[in-house]
Image: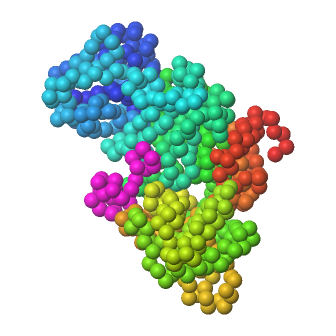
Amino acid sequence: MAARLLLLRHWTLAATPLLRSTATASASSAAATIPGPPILVQQRLALSAQVQKYLVNPDQHRQDDNSNNGDNNAMPIGFSDAPIRPVDVAANISAFFFSSSKHTSSLFLSQQSARSFTTSTDSPQMVITNQQGDSLTRSFTHELDRTDVETFPIPGAKVFERFFDCPLDYSHPNDGRHIRVFVRHIVPKTKTDKMHELPFFLYLQGGPGFESPMPASVRSEWYSTAIKEGYQILLLDQRGTGLSSPVNSASLDAQFATTAEKIEYLTHFRADSIVGDCEHIRRILCDGRKSEDSSKLTLLGQSFGGFCITTYLSLYPDSIAKAFITGGVPPLVDSPDPVYMATYKRMVARNKQYYEKYPQDIGRVRRIMKHLNKVDVQLTDGGRLSPRRFQQLGLDFGMMGGFDNVHQLVLSAASDLKATDRLSTRTLASIAAAQSFDTNPLYCVLHEAIYCQNGNPSRWSAHRIREKYYADEFEHDWDKIVARGDDNSPIYLTGETVYPWMLDDYAELRRLKDVAQGLAEYRRWGQLYDKQVLANNTAMVAGVSYYNDMFVEFGFSEQTAQTIKGFRQWVTNEYHHNGLRMDSRVMEYLVSMLQGDVVDI
C-alpha cells in the first residue's frame, strides 16, 4: 500500500498546502499555527501527529495501514464534509488516489511515483525524494502566501496567476477525476500585504464557454469601482474555457476514446459545476479567516455569469455577501423552448430597426445571400460560409454598436461582390473573427443546456422553434426568397441561437458533431435553481435588466427578480447587453443601490 497522508478535506498538502507549521512542530506550536475549519484543538494536534507519522517514515507504517481490517478510512479525528482539494506534491509526482467515507477522507500517494518523504525542522518545508533521488522541496503554505505563483504589475494593481485542482463531479468529489481551474487574482498595489483580510470580489463572465478578459488596468470599467470599494478581485476562467482545462476537439480526443465518455464529461460543465469550483476556491482562499462574514464573496455576473450567480444563491446561499447581476437575470425555465420563442420575436424587431437605420443594406444582404446560395465559399480555417452562417452575424444586434459592426461587414462583402464577384480574404477573415463558435465551442455545444432542468433535453430547441414558427421571417434559401415575389423584402439575420447545421459549417464543431448531438438529446439534467431557497435569500442582490435586451428576455428577468427575496432591480433602456463594459456608471449605480443611495428604483 502507498504511504498515506491524512488531512482535512479542503486542506492541501505540499505545493499549495494550508499547514503553516513543520511536520515536527510541537503540539503547542501546531495548535497556534495550523489554520483550518473550527475543529477541536485535540483534533488539530492529532492531525499534526498523523502528518508527522507518515512523513517521517511511510514504509514503517505501511504495516499499520494494512492492519486496519481493510478500512483505509479509519481515522482518529473529525473531518469537514467540504470537498477535498487534490494535491500536487511536485511536477513529477502525479498519481494520487482518493477515498472517503461519510466523515473521513484520505489521500494515497502512489508508491511508484513517490519513493520517500523526509522532514526538515529548520523551516516549514517538506523534502520529497523521487525515484531518481532528486530532492524536491515544497513549503506548507497558505495559497495566498505562496511565492511560486507568477505575478506581474498592471496600473493600480498586482496580478497573481493561480491554478486550482477541482473535482470534476461535485456529486462524487472523491472519484479521482479532477480538472484544473485558473483564476487571475488582482490585488490593489498598495494592499498586497492585506490579502488575508481584504474581501474577495469574484467576476463571472458571460457565455457559456468564455473565459474572463485580462484587464490592462484597474483604473477603468467596473474594476475601478471594485477597487474603490476595498475589494481584491478574482477573475475566473470558468471550467472548459481559457486556461481552465479548456474544452475543444483535440483535448477531448486526448482524454477519451468514445463519444459516450466525452458526452458524460461535458455534462459537468454547466452552472452548477462552475459555482462548485467557485465555492471550492473560496474555501481555500478564505481558510483561516476570523469570521464567517469575512469569508463570504461578493459576486459580479455578466450575462451567463448572472445565471451562475443565481445558481450560487441556490446551492451555497451562506457563502455570498453581495451579488451584482448585469444583463443576466436568468429565466427559471425547465427547457429552452419558451426562451427561443421570445428570442425570435425580439430578433424580428431588431432586424426592422437595423434596416430602418441602414435601408440600403436590404439590397446588399440580398445580393450576398444570393451569392452564398450559388457559390460554396470556404473560409481559411476550413469552415464554410453558408447563407445560414452569414445570417448569424445578427448576434451582434444585441450589443451597443452592434448595428454599425454588422453594417461594416455587409458593406465590405457587397463591395467585394460588386468589384470582383467574390468575397475577399480580408472580408472572410473579418466575418470569421466575428463568430466565436470555433474558438469557444462550448458556446455552441452547451448553449441550450443552460436552460435545461428536470431531465428535459434541448433537442435543438432554437432550430425546432425556427422551423415551426419563424421559417419565413428567417428564410435562407434563395429560391424560396425569390418566390415571395418582392425584390425589396429584407432578409432577417438571426441572434443568439445555435443549430445542428452549425456542426457542418464550422470547422471545429465538425469534430464535435457526435458529442453535440448527444448533448442535445441528453435527458438527465439536474436542477440549476432552487426557488424555495431563492425565496428565502439573505444576501444583498442588485441587478440591471436591459429593457431591450436581445440575449436575456426582460419579461423572464422580471419574474426571476421577483422570486429572489430582497432583489433590487434596475430596469433601463439606456444600454444594451454589453452595458457593463461600455460604461462604468452601470457598476457604480448598482453599488449605490445596495448602499441605500437609490431610493426610487
| Left or right: residue 596 compared with residue 116 | right
Q: Which residue lies furthest to the left in this view?
A: 132
Q: Name the residue at 64% across, 27% down.
A: 230
Residue 455 horizontal side relative to residue 103, left or right: right
The residue lying toward the viewer, choosing from 496 and 38, is 496
Q: Residue at x 56, y 37 (%)?
A: 216
Say above or below: 401 vs 20.
below
Where on the picture, by quarter, is residue 367?
Answer: bottom right
> For residue 261: magenta?
yes
Please state which of residues 256 and 572 is positioned toward the viewer in this rendering: 572
Where residue 525 appears, x then y in whole percent?
Answer: 48, 59
Indicate the position of residue 305 as horizontal and vertical percent values. Answer: 58, 48
Question: Magenta segment, which residues?
Answer: 238-264
Q: Position of residue 232 (x, y in %)?
A: 57, 29
Location of the N terminus by quadrant is top left
The answer to which quarter of the image holds residue 64 is top left
Farthest residue to the front: give it.
419
The front one of 82 and 560 is: 560
Look at 63% across and 54% down and name the residue there.
330
